[in-house]
Amino acid sequence: MQPAPEEHALETLSVDLLVIGAGVAGLSAAAHAVQLGLTVGVIEKAPEPGGSAALSGGFCWSPADLDTAWREDPDGDPELVRVLVEGFADAIDWVRSLGVYVSEQVPARVNTFPSFGYSIDILGFIRRARVLVEEAGGWVVTSADTESLIIEDGEVRGAVVADRDGRVEVRAGFTLLASGGFQNNSALRAKFLGAAAGHVVLRSNPNSTGRGLELALSAGATLSPHMNSFYGHLIPTPLANPFEPRDYVRLAQLYSPRCLMLDKSGGRFADESRSYHHNARAVARHPDGVALLVGDEEVTDSDRSGYGGVSEQIDRIEEARLAGGHTARADTLAGLARQAAQWGYRDVDHAVERFNASIAVGGADLDPPRRYADRAFDKPPFFAVEVQSALTYTMGGPLIGPDTQVLRPDGEPIPGLLAAGADAGGLYHDAYLGGLSMGLTFGRRAAGRAAHR
Ligand SMILES: Cc1cc2nc3c(=O)[nH]c(=O)nc-3n(C[C@H](O)[C@H](O)[C@H](O)COP(=O)(O)OP(=O)(O)OC[C@H]3O[C@@H](n4cnc5c(N)ncnc54)[C@H](O)[C@@H]3O)c2cc1C
């Protein structure tokens, strides 16, 4: 973009769709929009497009069917969940149609419910989407930011954006918020995540600071009902070195649902069998801010690896040890408890024995109850890993309708304003049915909405 000649006479550009954020949601929208014949401009804050998608494992997955999805995400908006699940197959076909590598379908084995997915060349997708936009005459401007939305008569008509060359007014039929959530904004985290915000480390691109949320609020958006929800992973603690993007996939302790999760008093405090991301939220919200994963030989090597993507065949307990985390192995529970006591965990052996005794009589008295995998931990050797919570993205945001339109408090859409991906609220609450799928599906949906104004 070229600078405005004078402060009070901003240069004006015009596009059908202005996209704020070039991650998976924004680029899906932009690339699909040019295929639909729209003129498109993309503003990206980072020096390169990609966002958290570029850091991701590239495993794009979906629940097996809609009933499973509704059951696993009971507080999510059912119509948004329907869009996600019913749009998944088309989204995958579309990625393939762009010439981007997509693997055969495999089970998403990290989940405790029926689900399947595909490894996709996510960096290839990011490159290809950008090229599509630029070949069609659109633009992708990096190291740029959005100062404000242009709001006229209650309608969003674009935004004032700034890059190294200056400020420009971009007038647009539709403006899509796709800046990836507010996890990097400590004030917004404290406001919406509350106590949990103090305990988490970040596992995200560094630029998602809630700009989409702030812009949506400036246009009169209503917020999704559950602003305190987030997606994350358990990672080892302590860490010998700063937690860097190269650690984000390798150090995720994905096998936690197959373990017991204990606090420092030796008590269970969550149904740890539901999912690794439920566990990440539970640890973030616990006053200790850390917890102990305990398992035995039956928590096998395959449980310790990833979703199913080839890049994720990792021994995560060994990775935790190499990263400086508290890890222990022992042939007896007493031996394990002695090691964990050095990190402040009391009565670990008695906690496991109490759990095993309960399982022996059916587990009905477990408090909290366990939904899945009710088995005794009685096959030595035993292991323990101390964990903390790492936040990937926030789930709350401006509430959207099924066509990605940002809604007002009265439920009516704000004309001209769309949101997709982690910027959009309403899809998930303390549940997770995929992140890349969310960006692809709702990004494409936003393009469709902009094409049918
Ligand atoms: C390590 C890691 C591994 C993951 N693995 C998987 C996986 O295997 N499968 C899966 O389904 N999901 C995975 N995810 C989650 C997935 O990457 C996210 O859910 C997804 O990227 C969210 O898409 P998005 O487009 O909303 O945000 P992002 O992809 O993060 O894109 C947001 C973009 O907006 C930009 N931006 C921010 N503020 C502004 C602003 N003011 N103006 C302009 N641009 C702005 C950011 O720089 C970024 O480029 C992983 C995430 C991480 C971090």
Image (cartoon, grey):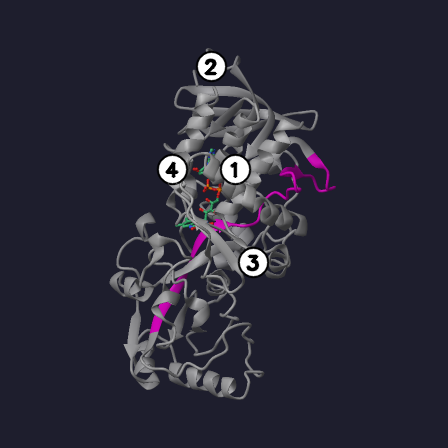
Q: What residue do we see at 48% from left, 76% from top?
A: 268
Residue 192 to residue 130: above or below = below
Residue 403 vs residue 219, the one in the foreground: 403
Percent across and percent down for residue 152 are 66, 24
Q: Residue at x 51, y 51 (%)?
A: 434
| Residue 405 or residue 159, whichever sits in front | 405
Question: Distance between the Cα atoms at labels 2 and 4?
Answer: 35 Å
Identify residue for label 2: 4
- Asked if disc 3 and disc 1 are in contact, CB closer than 8 Å, the reply is no
Residue 143 got which mark?
A: none
Q: Quadrant of residue 72?
A: bottom right
Does residue 300 lie above or below 174 as drawn? below
Give the residue drawn at x 38%, y 37%: 124
Q: Is mark 1 within 8 Å of ligand 1?
A: yes
Q: Quadrant of the C terminus?
A: top right
Task: Find numbered disc 3 in the image and state the secondary structure of the residue it sits on.
Answer: loop
- Spatial separation of the CA atoms under disc 3 and disc 1: 21 Å
Kindly identify which numbered label has been placed on residue 124.
4
- The answer to whether the beta carbon of the residue marked 4 is less than 8 Å from any atom of ligand 1 is no
The residues colored magenta run 384-413
Residue placed furthest toward the right: 410
Name the residue that disc number 1 marks: 178
Label 2 vs 4, first from the N-terminus: 2
- Quadrant containing ligand 1 reads top left
Q: Where residue 27 appears, x then y in whole percent?
A: 48, 34
Q: Is residue 164 visible?
A: yes
Numbered disc in front, either 4 or 3: 4
Question: Which residue in the structure is indicated by mark 3?
Answer: 430
Question: In terms of depth relative to the viewer, which is nearer, 274 or 336?
Answer: 274
Q: Is residue 403 magenta?
A: yes
At label 3, the amino acid type is Asp
